[in-house]
Image: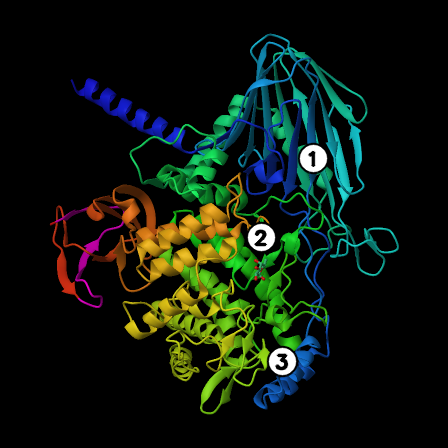
Amino acid sequence: MKRFFMLLVLMIVIQEASAQDKELVLWYNKPAKDWNEALPVGNGRLGAMVFGRAEEELIQLNEETLWTGGPVDLNPNPDASKFLQPVRNALFSDSIDKAVSLLMKMQGPDTEMYQPLGDILLKHHFKSAPSNYYRDLNMTTATATTRFSADGVNYSREIFASAPDQILVIHIKADKKESINFSIEAQHELPFKTSVSADKHLILSGKARVDSYGKKVSGKFLYEDSLRQNGMRYQFRVKAVSPDGKVNSTGSSLVISHASEVTIYVSAATSFNGFEKYPDKEGKNERKLALGYLNAALKKNCSQLLQAHIADYQRYFNRVKLTLTSQPAKELPIDQRLLRYRRGEPDPALEELYFQFGRYLLISSSRPGGIAANLQGIWNNSISPPWRSNYTTNINLQMNYWPAEMTNLSELTEPLIGHIQKMAKNGYHTARNYYNMRGWAVHHNSDIWAQTNPVGEGSGDPKWANWSLGSPWLSQHLFEHYRFTADKNFLKKTAYPLMKGAADFCLDWLVERNGVLVTAPSTSPENVYIMPNGTKGTVTIASAMDMEIIWDLFTNVIEASEILGTDKEYAEMLKHKRDRLSPLKIGKKGNLVEWFGDWEDEDPKHRHISHLFGLHPGRQISPLIDREFAEASRKTLEVRGDEGTGWSKAWKINFWARMLDGDHAYKMYQELLKVSTLNNLFDTHPPFQIDGNFGATAGITEMLLQSHLNDIQLLPALPANWADGHVRGLVARGAFEVEMIWKGGKLSRAFITSKAGGQCRLRTNQKVALKDGKTNSRLTNELNSPQYITTFDTRKGNVYELTVN
Ligand code: FUC
């Protein structure tokens, strides 16, 4: 009887799992017509965009370390610091144009660019046109599959990027013996060499450029710079293995004939040897690395590789499950579903899918030990990508990592934290060389070389080039990592020293003006104001965002010093300074003032909503803290409107969720899906930029769970359209894992897993109680409707069930 029962449970579990599998598939009935329809796979380091073409398959490759250039010049503009006081004098005497032209003299080189690794082509020659076409990306297994029939044979091609084996695998099968015949070629847009080794490895090798512009100098690209460095070397290697077919070579291609099954192994490496090493002369041996990965993987067959890949991937992916509907997904290709969604047809399964796609992309582009996900994650096919496919730190890099902690992918922040550590190293010199200041400074752009200087090369608009508060904003991610994991060791050893360094920079950066502390120069990325006298400007003093970012950092350092029992005096001094920051103001339109004065915006619907930093990702503004400032934030969001770039809409999901307005947050999610989503579900700025994918996944989480204030808010911004649902595996600050079931828009049950012990403090719309155990519950009325604060003590590893009274 017991065994029968166990079997039944197992069957239900399997059924549930396969139902979920079906939901989490992006499928199509035609090949990708362009890159924006190709499907991404990745293992953090290696990425591929799969076009799914039947006759001539195109697989576009990336390797995360392949960038132009080399280590940064730490003092590229030795005169810069001379101009700081003149800039301040100009600002204090309202000579804005003068301040702008002086600021341009404080700029330095632009960043380097992320580069494509090349393409693989699989060329078949069918007599008849392929039919029965299908391709997909299955997020449950992180594999992309293409299936079709040609000349009476059914073919399938499965592709995955394995992290444990550091290899890209393409597995081709036919349902008729010995009917696979094709050739494999490799190509790159820039000059390259191909060869086939004695072991029949097809090898493509090349060198990245040294200059960051992608422009030709006297008709040529630059690969060597006689003064400083040579470009980064790279190669990828392709090996085809078949149990029965023949693998021959032509010198620059592999030719496979009469096979029933073929496994193609693709390995790759660059000579990148760290951000401080010249990638050519001090570089790693890319040949040895690529060969090592390939030979190690060749010891395993396809199913062994696939098994290890799925186990590794699911270790992350399966931690969270979101169900917003009991209906099965529409039996339609994703592009068709998007089309219908745009016309207003509901598709909650698509909304679930897109949420998980953000998690899929993070697992595929940001792995411990690797490089942080850039503006395109790791997927880029252009030798001059938009915005250099670099790191933009006035919103975009941070947005990439917003979902990481709360959707249970905490380890994946390691590359970001690593990048912050590198930037702190370079930024120490930037703070000194550019401003004569302590601590570390990061400006608007960075790259694999951890560049931190203001970019613009003397002619960049200071509204982006001279934005200087990257170090305090990025430090938020350090403290958040602690808040989500309760890892005191990390706080002490890694986070706190870096946070304090950023605080030192801010302390030096602030100046006193009319009794308050201001930043000067200051911008509000990347907006333009109009003063009452008609003067337009971008540079000012004490923008709201500057004040909110510094408030956030000081608050975090103060809390961290209390937790660690250290630096009491320093923390007292920060409290004093925090109190003297130029205060936030409410403007004549009832909005939160963005600039030093209550000025108009040149573009009232500007994509950046920098002055609401305190609402999100900060924790200074909330309807639960101060109704007036929350109302001013609402007004600001209304004036800014619901349009914008992909990432701007994603940010607005988060803002409205923090405003506790689930319906408006949901509206923004719909806008993002309808207007800013490509057919492969990549977010589009336009063009493709990955931050919107990540920002939306974070925003959806904020609708269901918030914990940035003093309590864990269950279902704080649930929209009417998600009346019934179930989520498990989300993470709240304090290291609590949360599962919730809700019906008719109301919480019906919750489970809290305590990962670090300590008190749990919940905020809910209904009264909740522990199923087994004592809870302390009280009514609270910060909002117009009553809410309940429920506290109980937890022990590490225990699960607490909450019922609704
Ligand atoms: C910021 C934004 C742009 C774009 C770029 C990569 O500068 O203002 O919209 O996202 O980063």
Tag in front: 1 or 3: 1
- Magenta span has 456? no
Residue tagged 3: 436
Numbered disc total = 3
- Judging depth in this view, the residue of 489 and 804 nearest the camera is 804
- For this orientation, the residue located farthest to the front is 343
Q: Secondary structure at mark 1?
A: strand
**Magenta stretch bounds:** 781-804
Q: Secondary structure at mark 3?
A: loop
Which residue is drawn at the image coordinates 39% and 47% (left, top)?
408
Image location of residue 304, percent across then percent down: 52, 24
Image location of residue 673, percent across then percent down: 45, 46
Compared with 731, 468 (above or below) is: below
Residue tagged 1: 119
Ligand 1 is found in the corner quadrant, namely bottom right
Residue tagged 2: 375
Mark 3 to mark 2 CA distance (whole Å): 31 Å
Image location of residue 203, percent across then percent down: 74, 32
